[in-house]
Amino acid sequence: MNVFVIGVGLIGGSLATDIKASYNNAIIHGIDANDINLETAISLGFIDKSSTFANLNNADIVIISVPVDITEIVLPQVLDKVSDNCLVFDVGSTKERLCTIIEHHANRACYLATHPIAGTEFSGPKAALANLFRGKTNIICEIEKTGLKQRELALDIFNRLGMRISYMDAKAHDKHIAYVSHLSHISSFMLGKTVIEKEQNERDIFDMAGSGFASTVRLAKSSPAMWTPIFNQNKENIIDALDEYIENLTAFKQLMQANRSTDIFNEMKSTNRIKEILKGIE
Amino acid sequence: MNVFVIGVGLIGGSLATDIKASYNNAIIHGIDANDINLETAISLGFIDKSSTFANLNNADIVIISVPVDITEIVLPQVLDKVSDNCLVFDVGSTKERLCTIIEHHANRACYLATHPIAGTEFSGPKAALANLFRGKTNIICEIEKTGLKQRELALDIFNRLGMRISYMDAKAHDKHIAYVSHLSHISSFMLGKTVIEKEQNERDIFDMAGSGFASTVRLAKSSPAMWTPIFNQNKENIIDALDEYIENLTAFKQLMQANRSTDIFNEMKSTNRIKEILKGIE
């Protein structure tokens, strides 16, 4: 079984690792614009050999795990080259534009739009982890547009990797993911920025920071190369989410200015039910 | 050695646990407005016996670990009752107002203003943990106003508990802690609120949330009874921090609206240095 992984970073590398462990007959071919990353991936053992787009006609599976702006360019090229029976899936954090781009492609049935909700704030082949996907949710969009054979193979892979499957249309995916993922990244980056700006001349100030601060700014370590195109592709939904977030922050500030302690207490109390919501995640 | 702990929750309970383990001769007396919490603390074993303010004249050490609005009331009462040699310290997240309140108290030398940067998002006696303070920073304010004997005893305790000591004036403490702690709590609470509001009719939506979301909203589980008075006492500094945070979020949104991808990338890139800053914390 010839598996081509385009982009051998955190997600591509973690998928390659688990697929190698789950399928005895899998040969993992790596394609990456960065030769050093490709060499690292081969030396780490999760990629068997380096390859190129010219060989994609031999692929049984193609995984596209590059930043979402590159996926827009790469996906049609991959679909042009693969055989009818090939399964192609991407793992990006935006789905609507991508599904539209290949909507009328002759090989549309080869493609499955997926978004595994898994990752860390690190990137590159050295960040790849075995069993990263176990117990995590994989969101699949527009399943009905994917061929039967491809669906079966994809579900077999995700099943072996231990993922829970969730189905959603691409538009709804992008809207909701703006709230539960993209907004968190911006809140974290801007929190980091605010504190760094304020405290740039205060060398020892971060001694004062505890695990709470570390938790809220953790996502500000994330890769700008990965996140800039996500913010661009999901712009409208993210701006809606940001507007509501800024509105809530401003309202909270006004409660503080007016010394409305009971309202401040109640705001926090009602948000405490995030505890129940997080139980399924952590 | 008679140690009185007023407020037997997460921090008071964790201090009691470590002090019992570090001093063979320590007898831990618990005082708490909530009888059930006191009984729980005794049954968990970190409080030896329940007590009242009337017995404080026998105290060698008094630890005040209650919400900061209650501390303002309790601290002068405690100083009224203790003997000259007693060490009294609180553990609250605000220091300026408290130091001002007892500035001219006859027993000012008994008091040490401390803020151990340790805790979790949980509260109450069952949340108490052994070794919670090991390797953590303890900020001490206005050390020069505390008596020599009290200073020595306090440093002996903090040393045995494995804490790093940082000295700061109370005003500077409150200003900086607004950025590296209080702001994180508000950003987290409002993020939780924004997502809950948006998704209240979408039962399955939190299946889409991953560890990144969990990390950024973790602090929204925190106790409103503890945080409402902190926000009140440190109002001016927190409003400054909130203003800057809202400004940064708004500027980021405007970059998105104007499709300024390079600027968005650079904003994130420059904030990535939070990685180095967090190395000392996590």
Image (cartoon, coloured by chain):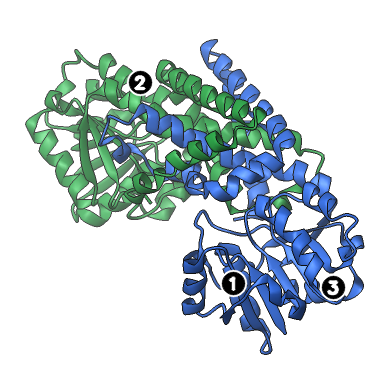
Chain colours: A green, B blue
Left or right: A92, with A187 as reference point: left
Packing grade of label 3 (10 A; few <14, some 14-19, many >=20) is many
Distance of label 2 from label 3 (alpha carbons): 67 Å
Location of residue A236 with respect to A32 vertically, above or below? above
Distance of label 1 from label 2 (alpha carbons): 51 Å
Whether residue A121 is visible, yes or no, is: no
Give coordinates of residue B211: x percent, y percent: 41, 46
Q: Closer to us: mark 2 or mark 3?
A: 3
Check disc 1 and report the residue beneath it: B131
Give coordinates of residue A95: x percent, y percent: 31, 24
In the image, what residue occupies the spot 75% across and 66% down?
Answer: B78
Q: Closer to us: mark 3 or mark 1?
A: 3
Q: Secondary structure at mark 3?
A: helix
Question: Image quadrant of residue B11?
Answer: bottom right
Q: Secondary structure at mark 1?
A: loop
What kind of residue is marked 2? Glu
In the image, what residue occupies the spot 28% across and 20% down?
Answer: A171
In the image, what residue occupies the spot 70% across and 36% down?
Answer: B235
Location of residue B178 with respect to A108 vertically, above or below? below
| Nearest to the observer: residue A98 or residue B2 | B2
Question: Image quadrant of residue A147?
Answer: top left
**Label 3 with label 1: CB-CB less than 8 Å:** no
| Nearest to the observer: residue A29 or residue A214 | A214
Packing grade of label 1 (10 A; few <14, some 14-19, many >=20) is some
> On the same chain: label 2 and label 3?
no
Check disc 3 and report the residue beneath it: B150
What kind of residue is marked 3? Gln
> On the same chain: label 1 and label 2?
no
Whether residue A64 is visible, yes or no, is: yes
**Label 2 with label 3: CB-CB less than 8 Å:** no
Distance of label 3 from label 1 (alpha carbons): 23 Å
Check disc 2 and report the residue beneath it: A72
